[in-house]
Amino acid sequence: MMNKLLNSLFVLAVSSLTALSVQAQEVKGDAKAGEGINAMCIGCHGIKGYQASFPEVYRVPMISGQSAKYIAAALNAYKKGERKHPSMRAISETLTDQNIADLSAFYSQHGLLDGQSSAPKEVKAPSAQVAALLTKANCASCHGANYSTPIDPSYPKLAGQHADYLYVALKAYKNDANQVVGRNNAIMAGMAKQYTNAELKLMANYLASLQGDMKVVPQSRFR
């Protein structure tokens, strides 16, 4: 029964991603333009160790080196109200489709050196307990065996992301009906609700321990 449910969710995910990919292709991002409008982003995402205090204290996610299509998908989810975080909703509502495309293009390249490979160098094997948890929802089938090469760039890279942020994000999918902290995503809600919060924290800690592409790039002094 669970395998049938997961297969149905997977088909729904592929269909949704196809639609998102077509939509994303309609607006081409300009990284240089994104650099010129990122002042609203660097105040949180450009400070190493910076912590949000709502809905609980956690480090804000690293977005430099994240997939452009995922950044765009996330911003659009905040803009549409599918993600409820008040600060991110307020910011995203001020952005046009072109702004979102430009910021996404900028941050996907931010901090990468010319010719630098984006492939993680190694994958640390999880403990037996964590491996079983990851297998339960078949997380690698969408996010990649190394959790940094998702099957579609509209899905996030997870490897190396802050553990406390991953934990809060996963809990938000369990609280999808919450009008302040919830995230409305049928696929992720179905996955996250299979786990206790303690299990989500174990998975978040493992994913954070992996090598990935994302980093925090402070604002240049010469900006």
Image: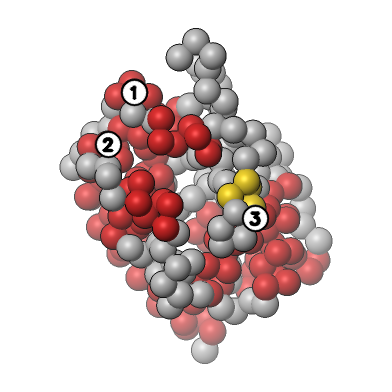
The type of residue carrying mark 2 is Asn
Q: Quadrant of the C terminus?
A: top left
Q: Residues within 10 Å of mark 3 (few under 14, many from 20)?
A: few
The type of residue carrying mark 1 is Gly
Residue receiving disc 1: 36
Q: Residue at x 52, y 23 (%)?
A: 219
Residue receiving disc 3: 57
Estimate the x, y position of residue 19 in percent, counting from the top left: 25, 57
Left or right side of 147 for 63 = left
**Quadrant of residue 170 within the rendered picture:** bottom right
Q: Residue at x 27, y 45 (%)?
A: 94
Vertical placement of residue 53 versus 160, above or below: below
Marks 1 and 3 sit apart, C-alpha to C-alpha, by 29 Å
Is 22 or 75 nearer to us in this picture? Answer: 75
Marks 1 and 2 sit apart, C-alpha to C-alpha, by 10 Å
The type of residue carrying mark 3 is Val
Is 192 or 83 nearer to us in this picture? Answer: 83
Dot 2 falls on a residue whose secondary structure is helix
Residue receiving disc 2: 99
Q: Residue at x 80, y 66 (%)?
A: 128
Is 113 or 138 nearer to us in this picture? Answer: 113
Is 107 or 83 nearer to us in this picture? Answer: 83
The disc placed on residue 51 is none
